[in-house]
Amino acid sequence: MRIYINEDKNEYLANFYDRRKTFNEEIREKVKKILEDVRTSGDEAVRKYTRMFDNVVLDSFEVTDEEIERAKIDEDLKVALQKAKENIFTFHQRELEKSWNIEREDGSRFGIRVYSIQKVGVYVPGGSAPLPSSVLMNIIPAKVAGVKEIIMCTPPLKDGSVSPVILKAAKMAGADRIYKIGGAQAIAAMAYGTESVPKVFKITGPGNAYVACAKNLVFGDVGIDMIAGPSEILIVADETANCDYIAADLLSQAEHDAMAASILVTTSMYVAEKVREKVSERLKSLERNAIAKKSIENNGAIIVVDNINEAAALSNAIAPEHLELMLNDKILTDELIDKFYNAGAIFVGEYSPEPMGDYFCGSNHVLPTGGTAAFSSPLGVWDFVKRTSIVNYTKEGFFKDCRHAYNMAMAEGLTAHAKSVKARCEDEQVF
């Protein structure tokens, strides 16, 4: 894990920004073909790509109630999922928006009505490990928002089943229908609908580069949450930080995939050197050693800066998915935290490791990546609602304002707009 002194950091940053290209032109062309096939051929195309990519031949894509009932998981895990569900539900209830009105003395009312999206699709990836936490994080905010129908797609296992823990989490969270479909073909099926899969209005959930590209291409036909890229963690630490904790937390993201980025920004050369040593030690005993090692070698970095203000500026420039602040408790004030304004989620203090947010405390772990935390937010209830403006003039209010609207329409050369206003004024002495 290379150490960069402050003035050398630009070399790392240039390469880091390049890795943010989520998918290349070759992937885009392959995904475009899959989307068009599914759009025109429906289930037949989905079946073809499931056979091609998952090596499974399925007669039916939808998971039955019997399959869900047969799914068994460890009791301790069931308790953990239930408690996590409760925390996520409580956290996201705070995000609920209310409709509002401005009412004038003349009785006219103008405002916003907040409505839940009627039907959404959630994608949950397969890969080397099942992700029940992603099930909870995507479905529960939709339930809190009042979404009427939630469907979920996830890749089938080699025997045509779905991981039991994924099924239990989906049932617990409130999925209405579950489909054994993965990859770009799942995104296409939810975006366009097939004989088996209903068309939805919005798609959320993480996935690989093919899934991310598919979401990018169907945007406009449906809504999406975000284009998720490789995972990121940036830790800001001073001389008081626990180096073993830092190393453990850097590796918690490195084990995701070889493209994940784990970055330490510190004001202490001692901490920089000690963390590098600890990372090497911990890598040896890590179960997902090969993935984490490649991630650290390709995208890991330790950057030494002169002070916390420089650390904040660097962090804001990177806008990481996860930001941990391991600093002296005496300086960890809200005022200091607010200097770090570009991050998907901020974990404050040495007892707030990123996995506690990923899994349990209730905050959402679907976070903006690739620098998009500079303008994007975590997945939340707000992603599953839409807002409609309400304009309700009384006659008195209309005649009070109509001349101004008429004059603005005429100034823009939109005479039909102006005549629409004037048509209501034939019997009045307004103009």
Image: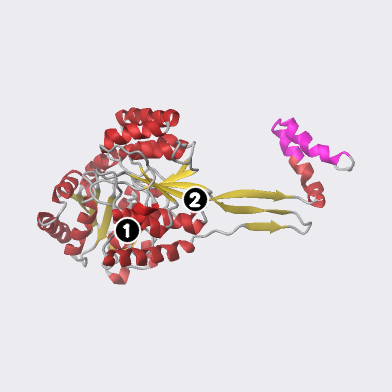
Q: Where is residue 112 shown, x and y percent of the image?
A: 62, 53
Q: List x then y, in percent, for residue 52.
A: 28, 33
Q: Which mark is residue 422?
A: none
Query: Dot 1: what SS?
Result: helix
Residue 240 against residue 142 in the figure, above or below: below
Residue, disc 2? 149
- What is the three-letter code of the residue carrying label 1? Asp
Q: Please determine whether, in this image, residue 90 is positioned above or below residue 213.
A: below
Tell me how far mark 2 sits from mark 1, CA to CA. Answer: 25 Å
Disc on res. 358? 1
Q: What's the residue at 77%, 59% (across, down)?
A: 105
Q: Residue at x 44, y 44 (%)?
A: 203
- Which of the pair 403/224 is nearer the observer? 224
> Would residue 225 be visible to someone looking at this image?
no
Q: Residue at x 32, y 46 (%)?
A: 125
* Camera sees residue 357: yes
